[in-house]
Amino acid sequence: MYAPQRPYEEFAYSDAPVRDGFWASTVPAPDVLPVLEGDIRAEFAVVGGGFAGVAAALRLAEAGADVVLLDARDPGWGASGRNGGLVSIGSAKIDDLTIEKRHGRDDAAAFYAAERRAIEAVAERRARYGIDADVHSEGYTLAAHHPRAVSGLHAYGERYAQRYGLDYRFLDAADMRADGLNSPDFCAAVQLPLGCALNPLKMHRGLLRAACEAGVRVFANSGVERIAGAYTLHTRLGSCQASTLLIATNGYVSDDLPGHRHRVLPVQSNILVSRPLTDSEIEAQGWHSDQMVVDTRRLLHYFRLMPDRRLLLGLRGTVRASAESLATTRARARADFERMFPAWRGVETPYFWSGLIAMSRELLPFAGPVPGHVRAWMTGAYHGSGVAMAPYCGELIADSALGRRREPHPQFMQRTPAQFELGRYRRAVLPAVFAAYSALDRFGV
Ligand SMILES: Cc1cc2nc3c(=O)[nH]c(=O)nc-3n(C[C@H](O)[C@H](O)[C@H](O)COP(=O)(O)OP(=O)(O)OC[C@H]3O[C@@H](n4cnc5c(N)ncnc54)[C@H](O)[C@@H]3O)c2cc1C
């Protein structure tokens, strides 16, 4: 029997982490998609049905190609259908100066352009495919969790201004209160003009529908277990022979996929959602802004008051994937919620779930050829900011496979990502990294 080589406990790949998820309650039950049975052929085979895989398949189909998309579960079951819905820049985990130093100014500029285009493309897809995804927030807000982090806000705003020539707005504590962003946890903030927030599952459903309508043959519960030659993709009950292969499995990667061995480090991210808040509760806290907010912690929080007046709060920093660990992280999320919004200490938070994001050794996203293979591309490692970047990168590898370029595509993203030290045990570095981050966060440095 096939046993995928994956770095986490089986729990991370089960339904358990998303059993108490919120987004599924906002949409009808998904259409039942076929399972791949028997042997089929296609021009292009796409592995993974998150934002990246679906956008890649849609791009190919709209170019007139014959496309099959295979997902191990239901498309959207991964991070794409369970994230916080923040559409923003931030897909690299190194700062702009480091990118420029390592990769040169031209390639850095191509990356900045790519991140901006990725955000614009989200709005274009919504308009083009008529997707109603409960959009709110004008750009997003970065909030300082410590007085020492305030100077970093200015630096961040300046970097933003240098990248895009767009103004940022600085808010001190009084401005934050006036803007309906009142929390004892934050002393200042900057508002950045690009981006928004949305319901990711509605967004994914809309894209998937568009892909199906464009002629993509989508198969669910059809995990690719082995890829032979160039290329026969074997699933449990069938196979698909295709001349071109695209892989978009991100945090749900298995090391046995071509070109992926130890090159992607999945990391857990978690979200807590409250019941709808009443007018008086919102007034008591003084938090009524619909801005999407991210804080300056290294183990960052992301949070927003959604259009239905529920508070969504996301956090990172969980190492193990188990029922106990999920319960511990839920308690930590609840404690953070009560500290950040003390007037809501009595408010229930019935939804909590977690999922896998992905990092690369270079701390940059990748969208390039599969090493050692012809007519094969792969993408991933959006560092927890993939709502915009994952579909954009899906389109980049689709365009590469079609032999064309339509959008900014930095050279460094086309290189093969390095392998992590410690190979299959690479996640062992996380406890030390998280402990160091947590200490630095406490001191605001
Ligand atoms: C809790 C959480 C909160 C987040 N919040 C935000 C946010 O607010 N803003 C933001 O920008 N990003 C956020 N992210 C990150 C974002 O969701 C991801 O970067 C993005 O969805 C990645 O899309 P993807 O298509 O690459 O991967 P995924 O959506 O993870 O899809 C990968 C797919 O590959 C399939 N697969 C794996 N192996 C195989 C195989 N062998 N055969 C077939 N199929 C396979 C899986 O079943 C899965 O459906 C968050 C992520 C999480 C988990």
Image (cartoon, rainbow, N blue to C red):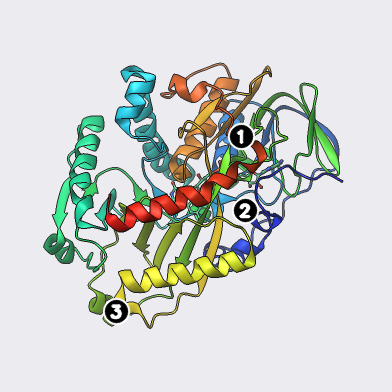
Apparent side of residue 205 relative to residue 257 in the rendered image (left or right): left
Judge the density around disc 1: few (<14), some (14-19), many (≥20) Cα neighbours within 10 Å. many
Query: Which numbered marker is on residue 343?
Result: 3
Residue depth check, mark 1 versus mark 3: number of the one nearer the observer? 3
Label 1 vs 3, first from the N-terminus: 1
Neighbourhood count class around disc 3 (C-alpha, 10 Å): few under 14, some 14–19, many 20 upward? some
Instruction: Answer left or right for 437 relative to 55.
Output: left
| Front residue of 197 and 327 | 327
Mark 2: which amino acid? Trp
Residue 77, disc: 2
Determine if the C-beta at disc 1 is less than 8 A from ligand 1.
Answer: no
Q: Secondary structure at mark 2?
A: loop
In this rendering, the label closer to the viewer, 3 or 2: 3
Closer mark to the observer between disc 2 and disc 1: 2
Q: How much space separates mark 1 and mark 3, taking CA atoms? A: 46 Å
**Could you say where residue 358 lies in the image, as x and y percent from the top left?**
53, 42
Query: Horizontal placement of 226 versus 177: left or right?
Result: right
Residue 299 in view of the camera: no
Tell me if label 1 and label 3 are in contact, CB under 8 Å: no
Label 2 beta carbon within 8 A of ligand 1:
yes
Q: Residue at x 61, y 34 (%)?
A: 57
Amino acid on which disc 1 is placed: Ala
Residue 38, picture quadrant = top right
Give whichever of discs 3 and 2 has the lower sequence position.
2
Horizontal and vertical percent for residue 390? Answer: 50, 39
Q: Which residue is mark 1?
A: 57
Residue at x-position 65% and y-position 26%: 65
Q: Earlier in the sequence, mark 2 or mark 1?
A: 1
Mark 3 residue's CB less than 8 Å from ligand 1: no
For marks 3 and 2, give the CA distance: 34 Å
- The answer for how far apart the CA atoms under marks 2 and 1 are is 17 Å
